[in-house]
Each structure stands twice: as C-alpha cells, then as structure tokens.
Amino acid sequence: MADNLETTVAFWYLAIAAVGAGVLMLASRNPVHAAISLVIVIFHVAGLFVILGAGFLAVAQIAIYAGAIVVLFLFTLMMLDMRRLPEERVTHRQIWLGIPLGILLAIEAVVVSVGTPEISESIKGAFPPATVSELGGSTQALAVALFNEFTLPFLGASVLLTAATIGAIVLARRIEVHEQADYPQARPGSSDEAAADQSSAAAPVLEESAR
Amino acid sequence: MMLNGFLVVGALLFALGATGVLIRRNAIVMLMCIELMLQGANVTLAAFSRYLDDQAGFVLVVFSLTVAAAEVAIGLAILVALSRVNPVVNVDQLDSLSG
C-alpha cells in the first residue's frame, strides 16, 4: 500500500485514538470504564491492521477481542459484583515507581522504533504485493502461509484452546466441601480395610457435591 | 517511513500496558493491561510482516489472538475461583501464600 495522504491521515487518527484510549484505560477508576476503553483500543488497532493490508486480522481482532474477550471481562466483573468489594486505593507506594519506569520503557521503545533502519530488498520475504494479489488477496496469502508452513503450530493452537477450555471449566466449577465428608487419606492410623469402608461411605457425598 | 510510525504505536501500547500492570491493583484491570501489551506486540508483528513482505508476522498475530483468548479464560477462571475463597480483587490483599 502506498503511503498516500489518506493512509497517513487514517494512520495518525488511529494511532492517536488507540494510545489515548490506552491512557484513559489506565486512568479510569471504574473497571467497567477500563473495559470500554479496551474495546476502543481494540477497534483502532483493528483499523491499523486494515491499513497494513490484513483485513482478516482486523475482523478476527474485532470478533475475538471485542466480541469474546472483553465480554468475558464484563461478565466476570458482573459476577464478582465490584460494588460489594473494597474500593481500590487512590494512591499506593508502587505508583511512584511504576509511572517513571513506564515512561522510561516508553522512551526506550520509541527511540528503538524510530531508529529502525530502512528495510533493504535483500531481507524481504516471499510474499511481495504482486504475489499476494496473484493468490487472490491478503486472506488467501495468510491461509497459504498458515496451512503450509505453520500447520503444526496451528494444530498446537487447537490443543492449547482445548486445554484452556477444560482448565477454565475445572477451575470455575463450584466445589462444595461438606463438613461431614471425611477424606479417608486424612486418617493416619487407620488400616486399609477401614479406609476402604470410609471411602465407600464418603463416595456418595462426594458425588453429590460434584454435581 | 510508515514502518517507524507503526512501531512507535506498538511500543507506546506495550509501555502503557506494562505501566498499567505496575500501577493498577485490581486483578481484572491488570489482566486487561496484559491484553493491551499483547495489542502492542500485535501491531509490531503486523507492521514488520507488511513491510518485510512476509506472512509469518500475520500468522503470529493469529496465534497471539489464540493465546490471548486462552490466557483470559484461565485468568478469569482463577479469579472467579479465588473470589469464592477470598472475595477481594486487590492483588495486594492476595498474600496468603507469602508465608
């Protein structure tokens, strides 16, 4: 994409809005406002992806981040019921170290970014714009890379998502431990038969609590 | 050159996220700040991918989205499980493991 006037104007708007919404997110006292600011950041970063010629990533960004992740945040905020929780303190001692360190990190990263040299032709990859348009567009080019060179990581990602789903279900399941449910292994002096009897007696209670 | 502009945006978003993790004490907002850091990394990856004529960065952004979704699911599940035992979200008060 040529660096024409429209692209430059859109880039500056999206960049300033994304960073501004990020600042707003840190400054907002209410976690729900922080989540809304995160949505604004996500939409403007999706716009940056469009400028970079990655339409699929922009759509995936909006669908996954704004559509799933932020909604998950908002649901958790609703479930935890922030009004009944103690207020976050306005100032604490870490803020006086955290803000200078953050500014230092920002300056450092910006200096490195500005100093990035021009990209020479010799290190360019296998997908110049001509090849991308020959394949039918940026989404097709992404698919060619994803399903040829990166097939194994793609399958690994599915395993990761499965593990995360199972982990989230197991972690968030409500486990009620009944007071009368004695765990057999907690008795040091008991014989094996007595432990077996106790476990068979405790099993229905545990089954009930797991439901 | 446009590449430097995108890199600066990515760097600023990452620094904002890191600052947020340092200065905010609400566990949920800290998770959101980690998402902000991932956004900064995604912008950098996509910009390099575009200007290097390579698709690897875009593919990495796809994986980054996947990992972010998994991370948020697990993080929020831990918070929900934690809130049953100890209903606070201030991470300064979650110190029962610190001996």
Image (spheres, coloured by chain):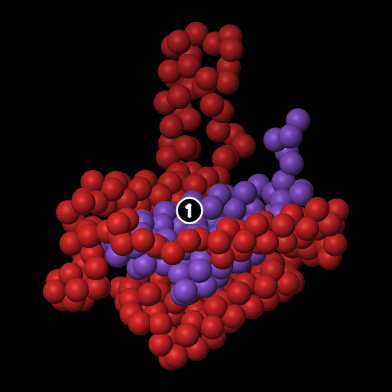
Tell me which chain appears purple: B
Does residue A203 lie above or below B72 as drawn? above
- Give the side of residue A38 with respect to residue B57, left or right: right
- Compared to residue B92, the image places residue A64 above or below, namely below
Q: How many marks?
A: 1
Q: Position of residue B20 (x, y in %)?
A: 68, 61
Image spot of residue B92 (x, y percent): 76, 49
Please tell me which residue is depicted at 43% across the width and 46% down the height of the picture. A167
Q: Quadrant of residue B22?
A: bottom right
- Residue at position x 24%, y 73% from top? A129
Left or right: residue B14 versus residue A48 is right
Q: Colour of chain A?
A: red
Q: Residue at x 19, y 73 (%)?
A: A130
Q: Tell me the element at label 1.
A: helix
Name which residue lies at 64% across and 53% down.
Answer: B83
Residue type, numbered disc 1: Glu
Is A207 placed above or below A43 here?
Answer: above
Q: Where is mark 1, residue-wise?
A: B71
Whether residue B26 is visible to the viewer of this picture, yes or no, is no
Chain for disc number 1: B
Q: In the rendered view, does A140 fall on the left or right side of B71?
A: left
- Looking at the image, residue A103 lies above or below residue A3: above
